[in-house]
Amino acid sequence: MPTRQKIKFGIVGLGRLGKRHAENIAFKVPGVELLAACSICASEIKYAQESLDVKNVYSNYDEMLLNKELDAIFVASSSNVHCEQIEKALNAGLHVFTEKPLGVNTEETLRVKEAVDAHPDQVFMLGFMRRSDKSYSHAKKMIDEGKIGKPFLVRCYGLDPDSQALNVIPFLKTSGGLFIDMSTHDADLARWFLGKEAVSAYAVGGCYKYPQYADEGDIDNGVAIINFEDNMICMLYVGRTAPNGYQVETEIVGTEGTLRIAAIPEKNDITIYDKTGALRECSQNFLERFEDAFVREVAEFVKCINKGTKPSVNVNDGIQATKIAEACQKAYETGTIVNI
Amino acid sequence: MPTRQKIKFGIVGLGRLGKRHAENIAFKVPGVELLAACSICASEIKYAQESLDVKNVYSNYDEMLLNKELDAIFVASSSNVHCEQIEKALNAGLHVFTEKPLGVNTEETLRVKEAVDAHPDQVFMLGFMRRSDKSYSHAKKMIDEGKIGKPFLVRCYGLDPDSQALNVIPFLKTSGGLFIDMSTHDADLARWFLGKEAVSAYAVGGCYKYPQYADEGDIDNGVAIINFEDNMICMLYVGRTAPNGYQVETEIVGTEGTLRIAAIPEKNDITIYDKTGALRECSQNFLERFEDAFVREVAEFVKCINKGTKPSVNVNDGIQATKIAEACQKAYETGTIVNI
Amino acid sequence: MPTRQKIKFGIVGLGRLGKRHAENIAFKVPGVELLAACSICASEIKYAQESLDVKNVYSNYDEMLLNKELDAIFVASSSNVHCEQIEKALNAGLHVFTEKPLGVNTEETLRVKEAVDAHPDQVFMLGFMRRSDKSYSHAKKMIDEGKIGKPFLVRCYGLDPDSQALNVIPFLKTSGGLFIDMSTHDADLARWFLGKEAVSAYAVGGCYKYPQYADEGDIDNGVAIINFEDNMICMLYVGRTAPNGYQVETEIVGTEGTLRIAAIPEKNDITIYDKTGALRECSQNFLERFEDAFVREVAEFVKCINKGTKPSVNVNDGIQATKIAEACQKAYETGTIVNI
Amino acid sequence: MPTRQKIKFGIVGLGRLGKRHAENIAFKVPGVELLAACSICASEIKYAQESLDVKNVYSNYDEMLLNKELDAIFVASSSNVHCEQIEKALNAGLHVFTEKPLGVNTEETLRVKEAVDAHPDQVFMLGFMRRSDKSYSHAKKMIDEGKIGKPFLVRCYGLDPDSQALNVIPFLKTSGGLFIDMSTHDADLARWFLGKEAVSAYAVGGCYKYPQYADEGDIDNGVAIINFEDNMICMLYVGRTAPNGYQVETEIVGTEGTLRIAAIPEKNDITIYDKTGALRECSQNFLERFEDAFVREVAEFVKCINKGTKPSVNVNDGIQATKIAEACQKAYETGTIVNI
């Protein structure tokens, strides 16, 4: 854990999630320093300087890369510039941690893969933060230890809270569709827990609550079966109308046992007994639910830099998750079984 | 289970709980017949005839006892006549099942004991129905099998729903006080699970929500520590303001494990996910919570009659439970530790 | 509830489930009498006489139907004779309650429908007992009252305990396959909760634990998506290797709320705290899990007879459930989306 | 959150809990620096230098206090030197955070109070970390907002895991007894949630599992009722034989609702379905259960220093908690009701 020399980060993008990452790097991840921040938005620059004490701020990403003190870049910008920024950072000799998605289409993600492969000594890690969550990583450990025998079925729920459903509408047009936008994390979990690659997908869905989604060419809830090698299966349910909050639930069924993670996405350890009954309040968003995981994933990245090891999430994981999400989307749109 | 000859019951008292017992005897308990019913209330008599097809109805208890077809009497009348009616039925050669309490003071309960002892071939059973509940009886079985090692502590919650708190006020004056009125079931459970007798009690409490209770000389919530032989302990909490419903919860702590029964008094197996969170609805009263137990206890009574065995709850259990409740009440009233 | 004249039942079939039904009719369902029993197995006849006090016993079904005292027939025989026995009983002027499945192929079930339609004054009811379970019926009531808005997705788990997986193997060959054998109850629930008919199905599965199943041409676990009218969806998971017991779990997702039934198939209300953690024991089979529902469904049947009303489960429900199960089976076998 | 100037800490004591605090200050609490460490144990000094990069190390506490760069002292030494070290640090002009207990008797804690009062501009905070736990602080917030009406009863379980019960035996002689050693945290919670002071205590207990405890003049489990002003009540259960792990559970009963915190001390969000049933694994010790709270309490301390505000836990809280624990201990030892 001790690091004589702190790893110096530059972050690009300080939106809602970017801010959280910046704060984590500035205050919560041991052995690091937030040396630089880049944003095209003046208020975000101001925030970095005043709230995070960032010394070097930039409105131009290329300029930030010229800062010779930097060790690593954290990419938290818009999805459409991820690939370009990753490549540039790698070419500048920097370690790179990027928020998901890797890119917006398979072509550019393959280009990133080339760049990553071309810089084998630099750490590249993708932010599938669920893998860093205490419960998810413990489940993985149990599975690897054989506690549930051979896993063969994963059920994934990835549901955003209904309270945010209307706020999302302006972004639907460019989101690529429900499955593209919401199923990469679940696709990654299924691959991770099953240890297999996906081979085909079938998906259905509809606009059940918000006709406005249909106006944008999208749906508000969808379900898929994703077939994996060796007949393994992923049942997927993604949606934007979860009544109780941010419901990320995952179940791994094995030949000797089943693990169910966060069947109730508890906000805390309190049970409230009142006139309605016995109530558990629920997490409302990913920042709340995965608060610790967002810190842990960066800590893992730093550890890899310090120890010269490989992170648990690599560029191929990003590519495969995107492929699965694309297949689900296409399956839904065509009403057919789509090969991956 | 087959009974060539059905056991013929006469019931006395057809109030809320009496009706339930009458219906159970008429329709749900195998091998029995509700042959007679006695009540001083005309509407109850009418109910017995019209809804339960009871052939023989009486307004006079002594007359009912003259019915030569009867095998057993079910006492569901007012607490203050229990003892007298039990004695008369025993003396008439009938088996007797009585609702709790056995009596309203220790003196008369001791007289019942004499009557019971004088008729050893007749079955006498007391309605501590919790012992017949599926969960409670399974817990007892696990304890007897040594699953939790040696039990040494029982925590009992016996809470009535706040929704009924105001309805109870007219009955407080004659109830004997909160501990007398509400702790015999819990006292019985503690004795049953620990397998020991109580030796002293200390109790506290107050009027926290309803000053009207104080006007009647009573309290709305109270807590006690009851000491048992061998240093064993019962922590008791009785009250009338449970926000979520009828909360009967019991925990038995042993040297190798702990059993907690009905920490959430679930109404059914449904979890409701809505905008408040994840909710379990709760049982609202003893008729709902112990629906099955009220049938099972009578089935046990019948089985004892048919097989000539002894029921699991006897007259001494009733006497001891009353003694404990009285000690808690006195401890509360005097602010001292009361020996039992 | 009062029935001057008890409904007189004859039961055919006294296997494991038939016995349970016979006991319920003999002892637990109010207002009925088990007058006759028919079985080709001498030991079952003996059981009926000795344990259930059945007066009229038959080895020939047609003879039983000649008994003029009978009001109703309970069909609990082998699946392959259900249809014939139902038709005969209806033609004999008797009310009929039949265990599921209605029949073993759509053709014969349509013939039953004709017979039912030809006797509109006789009550015909099918034993989809889950609908009579306290939790399931309460969920239905909540949905009908609009508590979860518009339901659009049902997730059904119908899992048999792994402890029985090897015992089932001899019966696989004639079972029709996993989906045929195990998904009619779930198909019925989906129709019931969604209030729509199924239009197509897609299914996958495999032998994950028991290669012996493959030897019999079957699989041990399977998953399906069943599309309903108006884009509604059923996610189905059926299997025979549930590690914890008999896991029947159903979730109904609506636009305003979600109901999850029996996420943990609790055996009772006890939480066991021991060195492994906090444990809930689970139900091990349908007789245990649906003990009360098996009584309630017959009580509903009797009520319909007495009041001249229609039961909640009719012949069409049986036909549709079978169609869905067949579609899932065919979808699995062909790897295609199958229209219903 | 931004702090131009980091608060510089010196820590004294690097035992099990001291190490955790040192790591938190070094790596996890934002805006602080672990500048110095003091221990009489060479291996602890080595650990501080090598694992935590601490620049200034001391074997003599007085010498550390001479370090002019220090802003604050963290006291994590043996209980018997807490008071002296707190006073010295305050007199040296430093802010002080001390682990509980404040002291080993009321007399010396009152002397600490004088020292704290004499330095009103220096922040003094006591490590009742439960108050900083996410669930506990949320419960307090709900209570302050009136969500449960008026709280009147607190039930506290403070149970150490049975797995550690034998390891503790060597320390029993100097622990002061079960209630002294284990009930200050719970006493503090009761005061905090009820907003009242304790007036008397009654306690019972025994050696139920380990006769070795009796050999040391101690007991392994004990229960108390603590009376608070306005008839309010705390039911306390402390013990060392919890089968499932480290069970800190707290229930606050109010006139309009009840909050129950950590009824199952869940290790994570996973439910394990296996042949035993549905299992939740449990936390095994306070470092695991209160991992986050140990960070948050120091963050609060730092915030108070930076903003000149008062911490939520003050010297009087420590004094009162100790008084309550002493009263419980005396009540147990004398078998009487002890006034506080």
Image (spheres, coloured by chain):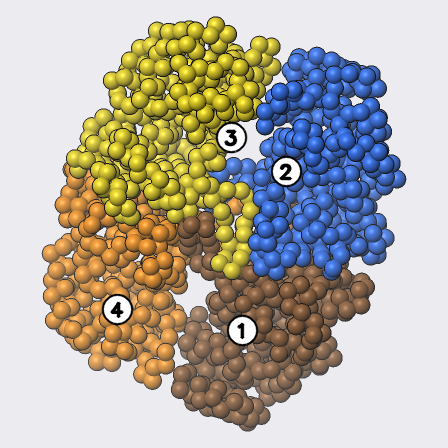
Chain colours: A orange, B blue, C yellow, D brown
Of circles 2 and 1, which is in front? 2
Q: Which mark is residue C292?
A: 3
Q: Is the C-beta separation of discs 1 and 3 under 8 Å?
A: no
Where is mark 2, residue-wise? B132
Residue at disc 1, secondary structure: helix
Q: How many marks?
A: 4
Which residue is nearer to you in this view: A166 or A298?
A: A298
Residue at disc 3, secondary structure: helix
| Residue A241 visible, this angle | no
Where is mark 1, residue-wise? D301
Give the residue type that dot 3 points to.
Asp
Q: Which residue is drawn at 73% across and 35% down?
A: B126
Q: Which residue is drawn at 52% across and 81% down?
A: D15
* Label 2 chain ID: B
* Label 1 chain ID: D
Of circles 1 and 3, which is in front? 3
Give the residue type that dot 2 points to.
Ser
Instruction: Locate residue B169 relative to residue A265 in the image: left or right.
Output: right
Q: Residue at x 58, y 92 (%)?
A: D62
Of circles 2 and 4, which is in front? 2
Q: Position of residue B231 (x, y in %)?
A: 73, 60
Which residue is nearer to you in this view: C41 or D239?
A: C41
User: In whole angstroms, how far apart are the C-alphas of marks 4 and 3?
Assistant: 53 Å
Density class for disc 2 (Cα within 10 Å; few <14, some 14-19, many ≥20) is many
User: In whole angstroms, how far apart are the C-alphas of marks 2 and 1?
Assistant: 54 Å
Where is mark 4, residue-wise? A311
Residue at disc 4, secondary structure: loop
User: In whole angstroms, how far apart are the C-alphas of marks 2 and 3?
Assistant: 16 Å
Instruction: Locate residue B316 relative to residue B19 in the image: left or right.
Output: right
